Image (cartoon, helix red, strand yellow):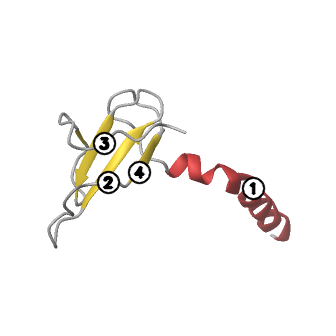
Amino acid sequence: MKELFMIFVIMAVILTPFLPALLKGKCPNCGKRKLVTYEPDLAEPNAPGTYIAYFNCQNCEMRFERNKSGPLVPLQSESIPHIPVQ
């Protein structure tokens, strides 16, 4: 029983560095796990009670927005500035 527990602990330690890549969002356009959130510089802040998150795909450079926990919607307007991928 101790050996099985130690194998589980060792596997958990080995998999820990890969967790951020596994927890990243999946881009609906290209299907890769390269979505990064960003905070745009808006002229007027969002109204209180609105929860809009903005995402940028590092692979295909598409921009998305998500209202609360809804689906990712591609941004069509140029009112949100583009954040260059680092």
Could you tell me how far apart the alpha carbons at marks 4 and 1 are, in whole angstroms?
29 Å
Q: Where is residue 30 in the image (x, y as percent from the top left)?
A: 39, 26
Q: What element carries label 3?
A: loop
Quarter assignment of residue 78? top left
Could you tell me how far apart the alpha carbons at marks 2 and 3 are, in whole angstroms?
7 Å
Reply above or below: 16 against 61.
below
Could you tell me how far apart the alpha carbons at marks 1 and 3 are, in whole angstroms?
42 Å
What amino acid is at disc 4? Thr
Of pointers 2 and 1, the one earlier in the residue sequence: 1
Q: Where is residue 53 in the image (x, y as percent from the top left)?
A: 30, 55
Q: Name the residue under label 2.
A: 41
What amino acid is at disc 2? Asp
Check whether the beta carbons of the residues at disc 4 and disc 3 lie within 8 A of each other: no
Q: Position of residue 4 (x, y in %)?
A: 79, 63
What amino acid is at disc 1? Met
Could you tell me how far apart the alpha carbons at marks 4 and 2 are, in whole angstroms?
13 Å
Q: Name the residue under label 1.
A: 11
Nearer the observer, 2 or 26: 26
Nearer the observer, 23 or 40: 40
Q: Name the residue under label 3.
A: 81
Which residue is at a point 76% across and 53% down the rendered structure image?
14
Of pointers 1 and 3, the one earlier in the residue sequence: 1
Of pointers 4 and 1, the one earlier in the residue sequence: 1
Q: What element carries label 1?
A: helix
Which residue is at a point 41% across and 51% down the rendered structure image?
37
